[in-house]
Image (cartoon, helix red, strand yellow):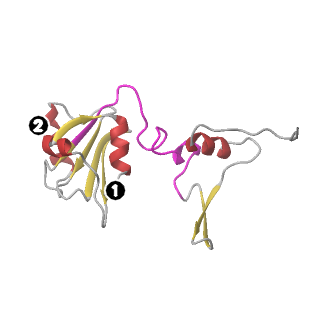
Amino acid sequence: MITFPFNVRVFEDVNEKLQSLLSQPASEFDSVIFVFNHSLRYKLTKHELGIHNVSDLLFPHGYGTFQKRTGQNYYLYYNCVGFNAGLYRLQEIVHSYSSTYVQGRDLHLFIERSRKKMKLLYFKDNQVIVELRQLKSQKYILTKQERKDKYTSITWKRLNEILSSRE
């Protein structure tokens, strides 16, 4: 029998492994190195990347931008408004479908007909925020029912599937 002077840790998933690795007390996480084609390397500090702590790297399993929180609702709007609509028009659409305004922790996801663009509408730090995301060549994946319904409540898991899916 061979004994080793160290412990072997087994992790359930990649997020747990990454979180353990980057939060070691012996070393402070301060930068990320990107390697392209096994040779080209770029080193960026965590501040340049907008990373404040290890949990900012863990997406989409509940640690990223859209964390799973109790009392948070997610709504999907498909082809409900012209995509050049601004903040006030998006708020009107939310009110017309749900009879409420953007509030609390709710997130409203607007996807245009081509499924190449999306807008995220949510309330954070006492302000309503609109984010625009656009794919150049692929499309966000929606089910036939989601495209048919135009407006539907979705789960946190489904939100993350849409944000990370490509067709």
Q: What amino acid is at disc 2?
A: Ser
Q: Earlier in the sequence, mark 2 or mark 1?
A: 2
In the rendered image of this protein, does residue 15 appear above or below residue 30?
above
Which residue is drawn at the image coordinates 20% and 36% (left, top)? 152
Q: Is residue 167 above or below residue 126?
A: below
Task: Report which residue position mark 2 lands on.
Answer: 96
Q: Position of residue 155 (x, y in %)?
A: 32, 34
Q: Which mark is residue 166?
A: 1
- Helix, strand or loop status at disc 2: helix
Image-quadrant location for residue 21: top right
Q: Are marks 2 and 1 in contact (CB under 8 Å)?
A: no
Seen as rendered, the residue at the extreme top is 71
Give the distance between the C-alpha atoms of the residues marked 2 and 1, in whole angstroms.
29 Å
- The magenta segment: 49-76
User: What is the crowding at mark 2: few (fewer than 14 residues within 10 Å), some, or many (at least 20)?
Assistant: few
Residue at coordinates 22% horizontally, 51% vertically from top-left? 111
